[in-house]
Amino acid sequence: MPARTHLPVAARCRVVVDNDWAGDPDGLVALAHHLLSPANRVTAVTSSFLNPVFGEVDGTAARGAAMAQELVDLVGGTQRPPVHTGTEAAVGTADGRSAASEAIVAEARRDDDLPLFLVCAGPLTNVAAALEAAPGIAARLTLVWVGGSLDPEAYEYNRDTDPRAAEQVLGRNDRAVRQFPLETYRRCAYSVAELEHDLAGSGRVGSWLWQRFLELPLPDWIPLGGMWPLGDSPPVLVTALGEESSTWTTTGSPQRRVYTDVDVRLLFGDMLARLRLHERTATS
């Protein structure tokens, strides 16, 4: 019997990953982590639109889908998930149906031994459209959302980019939801120096991710300090790693968890290890 070269990790779930990929590159960092994690099988990637505060919004869902596709191709593998473009506008301002919402419905309806997690770290537009088109899929998936806030007065980008979508999706307590609110995902802070050192030094995928930060057109009203939150990454703890070292409360029903703290060391230690192991395997 040949000696092991690595420990076998069992698949624990299927994942559809939804985000506004044309915006903050922290979403692409999280997508790379999902794609490289053997415990969660990414079956589809869906793209949403950007908030108008970042300027021109025409075609941002399509541009985001193109960026996600580039990353999927760079990571490679024999089972690359398809990438689908979502609607370019908020709920109620346009026809919400799109390739993205249809892909969510199709994956939720597909029979599989692995449970389905729908990870959204942006506005809930595509999720709302999917649930409106097929309400029955709510019982066939768990939503993992980065968004909202514990402080009801706080502005929170993901919720407030499409507040109507958030109301539609979260308005019922019978839906299984794992939520990482503003106060929790802000804990996932990375210094700018660490970001350059760790990503740029972690192979081709890491270098590609770092380049996305360098090329991001930051609005003049956003001053860059010494840190950058990688707030879209915590769902990997739910889908691929484990929640035992994080904390949460239940609200409304036992199916709804709101995380109050996350294991940042586990999360980012695994992310960097996955990037470096992928590079080592790709070049061996």
Image (cartoon, helix red, strand yellow):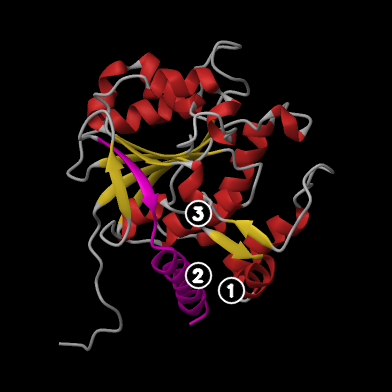
Give x and y (percent) for residue 183: 49, 46
Give x and y (percent) for residue 149: 48, 36
Above or below, 115 relative to 161: below
Q: Which residues are magenta?
A: 256-284
Query: Which circle's residue, 1 or 2, is located before the other in the chain?
Result: 1
Q: Nearer the viewer, mark 3 or mark 2?
A: 3
- Residue 160: which quarter of the image? top right
Q: Which residue is mark 2?
A: 275
Look at the image and tell me whether residue 78 can be seen.
yes
Q: Which mark is residue 30?
A: 3
Give how far apart the Cα atoms at labels 3 and 2 are: 12 Å
Query: Which circle's residue, 3 or 1, is located before the other in the chain?
Result: 3
Q: Is residue 8 left or right of residue 229?
A: left
Amino acid tagged 2: Leu
136 or 109: which is nearer to us? 136
Q: Which residue is mark 1?
A: 203
Amino acid tagged 3: Ala
> Disc 1 vs disc 2: Cβ atoms closer than 8 Å?
yes
Q: Nearer the viewer, mark 3 or mark 1?
A: 3
Characterize the local packing of mark 1: few (<14), some (14-19) or many (20 or more) Cα atoms within 10 angstroms.
Answer: some
Amino acid tagged 1: Gly
Say which element carries label 3: helix
Q: Is residue 225 left or right of residue 126?
A: right
Q: Is residue 194 left or right of residue 129?
A: right
SS majority, magenta: helix
For residue 147: magenta?
no
Give x and y (percent) for residue 250: 26, 38
Q: Which mark is residue 141?
A: none
140 or 252: which is nearer to us? 252
